[in-house]
Image (cartoon, coloured by chain):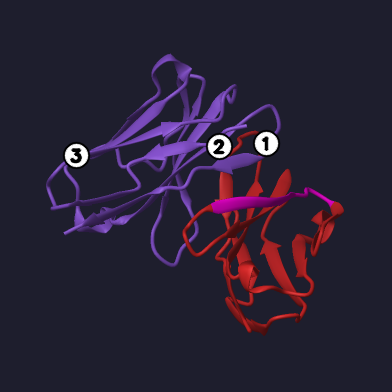
């Protein structure tokens, strides 16, 4: 099956800093989604982005499907951005999400 | 619009006992998913329903896990008997016409 690797595995930022999270996938995908799992465990959709670039406030994401990677940019980080960020892919005709290994982000004051 | 509802939020049982989780998807969503998330890992799909039919249950341990989605709306996931390694968060998600999945708050299960 498809392998989805994320980097870095852990990241500590001071409030206000910017960061880039990376997601590499081993095969062609139909789409890619980014999720934020908050410290209480709730998974929140951030982006549905099979290709190209999208922006939502301080967050933006870019997927380059031909090169099998996606990037999530967080600008002017806030403590509420803390949690785990997952990318997840859909392959083939199924709608089965394969989740990446996750990046655990901690934003400090 | 109301999100995906799950209950209970927390459950502690002893090994070999049985447990059931309930999920109510977003209204109108035909597809419902159950995921298992072990601490430190990403969610893993256990079973996917399209309306009340099973689309994918290839990673469901069928000797102890069962799931149903009567009438194509609510769903229950059951574990019988539970093992220590079943300790995890069980997440329910639903999806509509697009392929974005929306997740519920999860049920945290601890098996002692």
Residue B102 on the magenta segment: no
| Chain letter belonging to callout 3 | B
Mark closest to the chain's N terminus, 1 or 2:
2
Q: Quadrant of residue A74?
A: bottom right
Question: Sequence order check: which comes first, mark 1 or mark 3?
Answer: 3
Q: State the residue lying farthest toward the top.
A: B71
Badge 1 element: loop
Q: Which residues are magenta?
A: A43-51
Mark 1 vs mark 2: give the one in front. 2
- Say which mark, if any, is on residue B10: none
Q: Is the stretch drawn in magenta largely helix, strand or loop? A: strand
Same chain, marks 2 and 3?
Answer: yes
Left or right side of B80 for A11: right
Q: Chain of mark 2?
A: B
Which chain is home to disc 1? Answer: B
Q: Which chain is red?
A: A
Identify whether A65 is placed above or below A24. above
- Identify the residue position indicated by label 1 in the image: B99
Distance Cα–Cα, label 2 vs label 3: 28 Å
Q: Specify the quadrant that holds the C terminus of chain A.
A: bottom right
Choose mark 2 or mark 3, whichever is in front.
Answer: 2
How many marks are shown on the rendered structure?
Answer: 3
Q: State yes or no: residue A44 in magenta.
A: yes
| Residue A95 position within the rendered picture, expressed as x and y whole percent measured from the top left | 61, 36
Q: Residues within 10 Å of mark 2 (few under 14, many from 20)?
A: some
Q: Which mark is residue B3?
A: 2
Disc on res. B80: 3
Check the rendered structure and report the hue given to chain B: purple
The local secondary structure at tag 3 comes to loop
Q: In the image, residue B8 lies at what x, y percent?
A: 32, 42
């Amino acid at each position: 099956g498809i392998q989805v690797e994320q980097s870095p595995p852990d990241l500590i930022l001071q409030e206000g800093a910017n960061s880039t999270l990376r997601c590499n996938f081993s095969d062609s995908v139909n789409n890619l989604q980014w999720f934020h799992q908050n410290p209480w465990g709730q998974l929140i959709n951030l982006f549905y982005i099979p290709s190209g670039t999208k922006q939502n406030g301080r967050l933006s994401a870019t997927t380059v499907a031909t090169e099998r990677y996606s990037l999530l940019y967080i600008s002017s980080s806030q403590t509420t951005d803390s949690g785990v960020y997952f990318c997840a892919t859909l392959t083939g005709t199924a709608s089965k999400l394969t989740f990446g290994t996750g990046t655990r982000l901690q934003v400090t004051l | 619009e109301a999100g995906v509802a799950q209950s209970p939020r927390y459950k502690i049982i002893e090994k070999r006992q049985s447990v059931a989780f309930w999920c109510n998807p977003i209204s109108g969503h035909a597809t419902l998913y159950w995921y298992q998330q072990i601490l430190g890992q990403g969610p893993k799909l256990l079973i996917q329903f399209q309306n009340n039919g099973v689309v994918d249950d290839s990673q469901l341990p069928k000797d102890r896990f069962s799931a149903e989605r009567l009438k194509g709306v609510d769903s229950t996931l059951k574990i019988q008997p539970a093992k220590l390694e079943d300790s995890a968060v069980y997440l329910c998600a639903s999806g509509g016409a697009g392929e974005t999945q929306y997740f519920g708050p999860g049920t945290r299960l601890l098996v002692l």
